[in-house]
Amino acid sequence: MVTEREHQILEWIREDPSISQKEIAERANISRSSVAVHISNLIRKGAILGRQYVLSESPYAVVVGGANMDIAGKPSEPLVAHDSNPGTVRLSAGGAGRNIAHNMALLGCDVKLISAFGDDAHARELMDGCRNAGIDARGSLVIPGATTSTYLFIMNEDGDMELAISDMAIYDQLLPAHLERKLDIIENAALCVVDTNIPAESLRWLADNVSVPLFCDPVSTVKATKLDGIVGKLHTLKPNRLEAEVLSGVPITDEASLGRAAKALLDTGLKQVFISLDARGLYCANHERAELLPIIRSQVTNATGAGDSMMAAIAWAFLGGKDLEGQGLAGLATSSICVESPATINTNICADAVRKRMAQADAATTLPSPATPVAAAAS
């Protein structure tokens, strides 16, 4: 039976099928999250046959997070401390959120990015790059006189990061007030991916006000603490071992403690978790099952950006209806392609290439013995 409030909302939708949840909330003088519950009930009761008035004809994803200019240095020989090292220096678009959005676009997703930019040359280059990559960044905050986020890092000769300096103060301005103005964009998406470059109060606001599935990349152990108290409001979390330890409170030293850490995270209400263990693979868990998937071997040229590509592929696979294992395999396959390029984004990534590599997963490295210490191989 349709309630009086649901009947009222249904009439407004009949009058204007394009009406937003925010507009309904304002008319009814209730919260937007309450509107989302009423609409869900109307769909369940069959009063609404679908969410066409909520979702666009072409479903899209929203990414909320960092977009920086990356300056990367890689030596041609082993690094020598306190000295000038011959090598290469590359300038490229980066930032966890922007990288995730770019990888999702390469995989064929329609994706929108909400980030923060200054009004400098780096901002213009990043915005142009987003347009060229098929990313709609028009919902981002632009701050006159501010400096666009910059990330300077130095790799070793194997392509692994050795040292970095991040100038990301601009993200402190990406506050709930701006996100609230973009709530319709987020709520009309099929899912929202967020990184922890944005303020803790903004992460909490998203967790409290967004009804679409929230996927999160903790980014680092320091920034992961911004998720305290809201992990259970997320749908999917993709930490590495150290981030999983911080968020779960469980030191991960072997496979048994790995399972306990994942369970602690899931017990908060989190729907699924993917814990990256680098050379040991990817631990995938939800409330029904858990599985440790082995890595897919590839020739590593630059490991920077592998985690972002994995997060993008997990979200892409979820949108495609893949189960827990399918999402994990997609993440491993995409990251194995990502690291083969000297650039943070490997433009060879595409849906067909990822599916092909997923199909070859049986030929990947054999899963190590459960007795192998996790901590020795993970980072």
Image (tube, grey):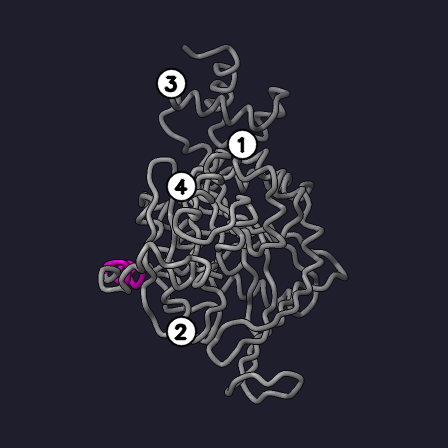
Estimate how packed mark 3 is, as few (under 14), some (14 to 19) or many (20 or more) residues with alpha carbons within 10 Å: few
Determine the residue positioned at 64% across, 88% down: 84
Amino acid at dot 2? Val
SS state under label 1: loop
Identify which residue, 242 or 340, lies in the foreground.
242
For label 2, the residue is 300
SS state under label 3: loop
**Magenta residues, as a range?**
352-359
Estimate how packed mark 1 is, as few (under 14), some (14 to 19) or many (20 or more) residues with alpha carbons within 10 Å: many
Indicate which disc residue 145 carries: none
Picture quarter containing residue 121?
bottom right
Amino acid at dot 1? Ser
Choose the circle earlier in sequence order: 2 or 4.
4
Residue 248's place in the image compared with 79, above or below, is above
Amino acid at dot 3? Lys
Choose the circle earlier in sequence order: 4 or 1.
1
Circles 3 and 4, Cβ within 8 Å, touching? The answer is no
Cα–Cα gap, marks 3 and 2: 52 Å
For label 3, the residue is 45
Residue 218 pos. (x, y %): 55, 51
Cα–Cα gap, marks 1 and 2: 46 Å
For label 4, the residue is 57
Indicate which disc residue 20 carries: 1
